[in-house]
């Protein structure tokens, strides 16, 4: 039986429908902005559909209401269950109830070279990212877009670097290493079939070969040429080398030295 819960934000509540749970253990998927987060979500949605696991996408729901995930109040433990659900769509680590233990569930973290993420973020924020129809989130995104189109890409990535660095540090601090599977965008973007198999095996879920091929038909997209107004603009790793000045790259190397070393980007 489905249940409706009230998700508390700072100034209001949003209704969340929890379908009847499956018998599978719950899991969470995290992917920072511009790390292939939409790709990860779509693949996991299909895997969950095949295995009849209900998907709960809190960030998508909040975005539709024109709000930010950062506005989630910590008192939302009734929505978090250790069994029965897939919690998808998290690009940042949310405020969460201290009573919920992430070490009791499996977690997926997808990462990407932060220098490429920043380049991708520039084109997304300036040209292609969809806006909510209303709300404070729409207003903030429109304001940001107006500013970005008057910046150079080098100015943008240096200004935004602290946001991405904080995101990586938070994931490193909050997610338990013993039950968090890390995937690198660079390893999976041209080898999605093995990636889907790895995800399924890690979660203990069954996906047949013909089902994998159907998933690939929908997500295995490699643009013939770059289009900065499309969400899938350019998937090739190393894009920062052609978009940024050598001086900017050197500064980013210093800023992200720990992240680049941790995830084997240097």
Image (tube, grey):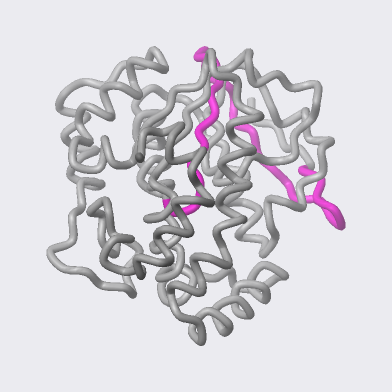
Q: Is residue 40 left or right of residue 190?
A: right
Residue 225 lies, with reference to residue 152, above or below; the image says above
Residue at image coords 63%, 80%:
143
16 magenta-colored:
yes
Q: Classify the position of the C terminus by image quarter.
A: top left
Q: Nearer the viewer, residue 175 or 259?
A: 259
Image coordinates of residue 155 in percent, x first then y, are 50, 74
Image coordinates of residue 264 in percent, x first then y, are 36, 33
Residue at image coords 33%, 15%:
201
Name the quadrant containing residue 1. top right
Q: Is residue 254 left or right of residue 10?
A: left
Instruction: Write the start and end of the magenta stretch as one range.
Output: 7-34
Instruction: Count up the numbered dots.
Output: 0
Residue at image coords 54%, 18%:
177
Residue 199 lies, with reference to residue 128, above or below; the image says above
Image coordinates of residue 182 in percent, x first then y, are 42, 27
Of all residues, the one furthest to the left in this rendering is 224
Q: Is residue 164 left or right of residue 112?
A: right
Of all residues, the one furthest to the right in this rendering is 11
Q: Nearer the viewer, residue 31 or 52?
A: 31
Residue at image coords 57%, 37%:
56
111 magenta-colored:
no
Image coordinates of residue 228 in percent, x first then y, are 31, 73
């Amino acid at each position: 039986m489905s249940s409706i819960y009230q998700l508390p934000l700072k100034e209001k509540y949003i209704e969340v429908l929890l379908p009847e749970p499956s018998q599978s253990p719950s899991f969470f998927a995290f992917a920072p902005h511009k790390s292939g987060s939409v790709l990860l979500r779509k693949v996991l949605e299909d895997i969950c559909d095949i295995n009849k696991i209900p998907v709960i996408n809190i960030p998508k729901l909040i975005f539709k209401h024109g709000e930010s995930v950062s506005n989630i109040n910590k008192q939302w433990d009734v929505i978090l269950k250790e069994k029965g659900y897939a919690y998808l769509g998290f690009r940042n680590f949310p405020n969460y109830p201290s009573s919920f233990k992430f070490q009791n569930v499996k977690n997926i973290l997808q990462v990407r070279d932060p220098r490429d993420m920043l380049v991708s973020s520039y084109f997304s924020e300036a040209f292609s990212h969809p806006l909510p129809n209303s709300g404070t989130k729409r207003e903030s995104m429109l304001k940001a877009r107006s500013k970005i189109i008057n910046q150079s890409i080098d100015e943008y990535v240096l200004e935004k670097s602290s946001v991405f660095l904080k995101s990586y540090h938070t994931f490193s601090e909050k997610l338990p290493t013993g039950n968090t599977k890390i995937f690198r965008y660079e390893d999976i973007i041209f080898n999605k079939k093995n990636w889907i198999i790895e995800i399924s095996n890690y979660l203990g879920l069954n996906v047949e070969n013909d089902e994998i091929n159907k998933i690939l038909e929908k997500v295995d997209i490699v643009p013939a040429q770059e289009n900065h107004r499309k969400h899938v603009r350019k998937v090739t790793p190393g894009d920062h080398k052609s978009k940024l000045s050598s001086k900017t790259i050197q500064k980013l190397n210093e800023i992200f030295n720990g992240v680049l070393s941790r995830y084997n980007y240097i």
